[in-house]
Amino acid sequence: RTEATIPTTLTFCRRADLTSMNKRVMESLIKAGALDCLGSRGNLLASIDRILSLAQREHHLRETGQTTMFDLWGEAMPLPMPSLDLATAEISTKEKLAWERELMGVYLSEHPFASFAGKIDSEATLCGQIDAELVGQNVRVVGMVASVRYLFTRDQHPFISAVLEDLDGRVEVMVWPKVYATTRDLWHEGDILLVEGKVRLRADRV
């Protein structure tokens, strides 16, 4: 509805258009934060089957013309809806942010790195500060692992290309076989790492 924000889960069930919404679509809406006005994402996900069942009931009533009844004065009144108590389920902030990034391509609530921003070593370089002027210099960078590509050398030794990001920007980090062999357990998306290395220029990119 464009004229007002949907205020409650029950109102959502009454208004939901099930011709364009199924369980998968609703899960995506909840995970992306589009239904935060109805309750916490954990509670909504835990109650999704109940919510859809109630929405299907309301849809059936609308389709069969049974959405109203008459009181003693002949006024049209909505049929009463069953109560809907949401189940309780806790979802971590890290998991919510991962859903936002997966579904929307951006972090909407906050950047996962935000809580670490004030703890960065004063000698560390921000990802967004690494440019061509630093080529050839050794730098220390603190950032969140945004993505990891798993690669192999000609001799079939594994290495990775990882992207670190902070609130200021992003930088690509090459982790060659010898280093990767001793740090492979550290390179997971969402983890915060302190990396030291030499800035190089490759294909006109730092």
Image (tube, rainbow, N blue to C red):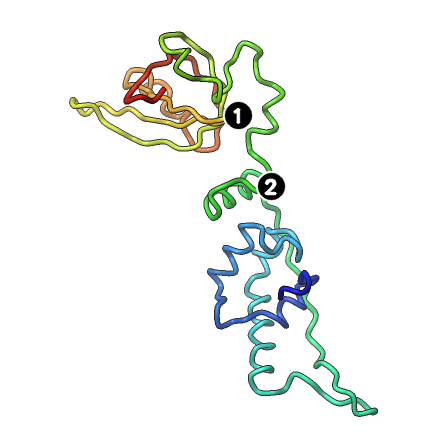
Q: Which residue is mark 1?
A: 168
Q: Is residue 180 left or right of residue 95?
A: left
Q: Is residue 187 left or right of residue 37?
A: left
Q: Which residue is mark 2?
A: 109
Q: Residue furthest left?
A: 155
- Residue 109, percent across and down? 60, 41
Query: Element under label 2?
Result: loop
Quarter of the image that includes the C terminus: top left
Instruction: Please tell me which residue is depicted at 66% across the width and 63% down the height of the picture.
Output: 9
Q: CA distance from mark 2 to mark 1?
A: 17 Å
Front-most of residues 67 and 45: 67
- Residue 156, percent across and down? 18, 25
Query: Element under label 1?
Result: loop
Q: Is residue 172 left or right of residue 99?
A: left
How many badges with numbers are in the image?
Answer: 2
Task: Tell me whether the residue at label 2 lies in contact with that at label 1, contact meaning CB atoms closer than 8 angstroms.
Answer: no
Quarter of the image that includes the N terminus: bottom right
Name the image quarter holding residue 123: top right
Looking at the rendered structure, the kind of residue marked 2 is Ser
Instruction: Please tell me which residue is depicted at 67% across the width and 65% down the height of the picture.
Output: 3
- Residue 151, percent across and down? 26, 29
Name the image quarter holding residue 77: bottom right
Nearer-N-terminus badge (2/1) = 2
Per the rendering, the mark at residue 97 is: none
Other residues around mark 1 within 10 Å, as few (<14) / some (14–19) / many (≥20): few
The label nearer to you, 2 versus 1, is: 1
Instruction: Please tell me which residue is depicted at 30% across the width and 31% down the height of the picture.
Output: 150
Looking at the rendered structure, the kind of residue marked 1 is Asp
- Residue 42, percent across and down? 60, 51
